[in-house]
Image: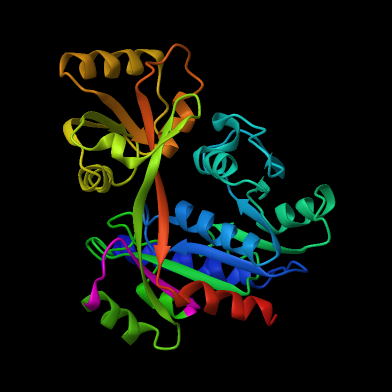
Amino acid sequence: MTPIELIYRLGYTLKKRAVLKDRKALPYPVISIGNITVGGTGKTPAAIAVAEEALKRGYCPVILTRGYKGRAKGPCLVSKGSGRLLSAADAGDEPALLAERLDGVPVVKSADRYAGGMFALAQLQMDGKRPLFILDDGFQHWRLARDVDIVLIDGINPFGNRRLLPLGPLRGPLAELKDADFMVITKTRNEQLAAELKTINGKAPLYFSEYKAIGLRGIHGGQAGLSGLENKKVFAFCGIANPESFRGTLQQAGSIIVELKSYRDHYRYSRKDMDEIADKAKRQGADLIVTTEKDMIKIKEISELPSNIYALEIGFRADKNFFDELFRRIDGR
């Protein structure tokens, strides 16, 4: 371990110890969905899937999210469960996406998730259903106690160079995985990784999952099936941590990618950017312009976009027993 990593690990350890001394608990169950690395393990689609399953099982789920880069301060409602109330710039990319995808699930933005949970209980009508809080990106949010910690690990590139920030993608030492209640390998069935994870945490159930394209959503909200991508020339663009994963998903759906234009993660598109994308797509004979759901949230606020822009909707699919075991633990709380 390098001196820089030692300094990071010391700061990480001291901060965790200090925060845990003042840890607070909400009066209803809390599920955290997080990871051990920086970047795209697919936390948002997983949070959507868990929330939808909670609805089916009679809970009133509420998403608690930090709202990375969102301008709105303090606990605030991104959604009451029936549409987005804040712009993507105010809410943050992921909260805005959660608000649009989830019907019947409130989304609360708050850097302090305990404060966000108490705000939700004071502001929302639960219709007699039992509240259930879901932390989006919560594994390192030690301030709030949780009943279940779900940790997602990318099956294609799990730990990068295995170095801690800022020299690598690890948010904390791999030993932190001992705190996970569930470990979920995403994107591919990596048996070698599964064996390694079991040596770190042999008590937590381990599941495999995948992300599958489930449809296309137009700029004005209309939906279409994946058959609309088959043998179509696609100009793709995205501002996410792992653009090659987006490329692979489009190719699996049968599209012919004429170009993939990638921007930095959480990029804010301008009118000029969109004009350049539309011009390039036209010159290359693209039938469709396709982006991610997270990017579509941001470009919606730009006027006069081409009508052939679509977002690729992604769904989280886990082993059959994952949800049964998860809610067995929550039901028993």
What residue is at 36 percent from the left and 73 percent from the top? 174
What residue is at 17 percent from the left and 34 percent from the top? 257
Highlighted range, magenta: 179-191
Of 226 and 34, which appears nearest the observer?
A: 226
Would you say residue 43 is visible in this rendering? yes
Q: Quadrant of the C terminus?
A: bottom right
Residue 117 in which image quadrant: bottom right
From what the image shows, is residue 205 above or below residue 107? Answer: below
From what the image shows, is residue 262 above or below residue 328? Answer: above
Task: Let me know if residue 123 is in the magenta part.
Answer: no
From what the image shows, is residue 247 above or below residue 35? Answer: above
What residue is at 34 percent from the left and 33 percent from the top? 291
From what the image shows, is residue 270 above or below residue 298? Answer: above
Would you say residue 74 is visible in this rendering? no
Residue 28 in which image quadrant: bottom right
Give the image location of residue 236, x and y in percent: 26, 31
Of 47 and 312, which appears nearest the observer?
A: 312
